[in-house]
Structures are given as structure tokens and as C-alpha cells.
Amino acid sequence: MSKKKGLSLEEKRTRMMEIFFESKDVFQLKDIEKIAPKSKGIAPMTVKDVLQSLVDDNMVDCERVGTSNYYWSFPSKALNTRKHKLQELQKQISDASERKVSRQKAVEKAKVGRQDTKERSSLQKKLQALRDDRTKLQAELDKYRECDPEVIDEMRKSNVVAKEAVSRWTDNVFAIKSWTKKKFSFDDSRIDKAFGIPEEFDYID
């Protein structure tokens, strides 16, 4: 046997509104918490949240008197609230319709001069052919970039800087070797072997 399906939030809200409309009375939360489960089948644990949702939507009035909150809602208020909500929805529909018409006009305007004619099709093909040629020419140009005088000049400058850096490091290596020989009386071959320095190590011409 299947379990009885619980009430949805909207069903609970509707039933709770019936409490106010049928009685046309003012209640405290504790009154609603007693009435709602018995007469409307609303789960006790959800009564407060359902009531607060109605207050938030301006369907139920709430006023604090002393230390207690009082709740009420009369059919006339609910009717006015629904009318106001309906007006809001109608305005949203109207605004959406205006935006739709405006965008349709913009689309139609954008289409002017872009009809799929033979001339347009021919021009598009020519444009694509020119783009393809440009891509091929760019690829050819990249092949000969190494022969570009500006690129060669830049490479020469880079080589000079690199050579100067290598010379500085070579100076440092020879200085360390000289200091090691004086300090520890090691010969060149022993120093080279200890530090992994090749026999042909020297300045670059």
C-alpha cells in the first residue's frame, strides 16, 4: 500500500488562507498551530514557515502588540493582493512583448543588404579566397623570417650578449681554479677532475 502523499507548499498556503477567510478572525501563532493541523491537515512542524511565507507575500497581515504577534487576512485584502499581482504579471508580459517586437525589428533591419543574392554569394567566395591567399602568404613569409635583416641583426646582438656572459663565467672558473691551486696546492688536472671541468675548457673565440 502506497504512502499518502504530503501536501505541497502551495496546497498548505491555500488551506491556511481558508482558516482566515472562513473565520474572519485575528490569530496568534499558537492558535494557528492548533487549528491548521486539525482542520486543514497541515503538518505542525511546517505551520510557522507556511504562515511566514504568506506574510512575506503580503497575503497575511502581521502586527506585534506587546510581546505577541497577531495575524489576520480578509477576503478583500487577498483580492486586492491578487489584483496587484495580476497587474504586475500583465506589465511584465507587456514589457516582454515590446522587447520581442523591438528585437524582431532589429533583426529585420539587420537583414537589409544581406539577402542571399548571387552577387553576395560571389563576393563571399572572393573574400574567402583572399583570406586563404593571405594565410598562404603569411606561411611563406614565416619560412623566410630567419633571413629577415632585422631578425639577423637581433640575433647578432643576442650573440654578443651571450658571448660576454660566457666570458664572465669563464673568468670566474679560472679565478676559482687559481685560488684553489694557491690554497691547496692542487694541480690543474686534479681540479678539473674534482669539478668536472673539461680539458679543452677555454674562452670562446
Image (cartoon, rainbow, N blue to C red):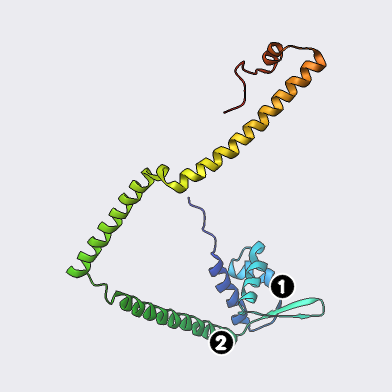
Picture quarter containing residue 161? top right
Q: Nearer the viewer, residue 34 or 83?
A: 83
Three-letter amino acid code at the position of disc 1 = Leu
Vertical relation: 86 (above or below) 124: below
User: Residue drawn at (68%, 15%), measured in percent from left and top?
Assistant: 192
Residue occupying image coordinates x 57% and y 38%: 160
Q: Residue at x 59, y 34 (%)?
A: 163
Sooner in the amino-acid sequence: mark 2 or mark 1: 1
Dot label at residue 80 = 2
Name the residue: 54% across, 60% down.
6
Please indicate whether residue 17 sits to the left or right of residue 89 in the image: right
What percent of the width, then of the height, locates residue 61?
Answer: 67, 81
Residue with the mark numbered 1: 29
Secondary element at image label 1: helix
Name the amino acid, label 2.
Asn
Tell which of 199 and 47 is nearer to you. 199
Q: Residue furthest front?
A: 205
**Disc 2 on helix, strand or loop?**
helix
Do labels 2 and 1 touch, CB within 8 Å?
no
**3D distance between C-alphas at marks 2 and 1:** 24 Å
List x then y, in percent, for residue 88: 51, 82
Quarter of the image with the C terminus is top right
Q: Is residue 169 left or right of residue 102?
A: right
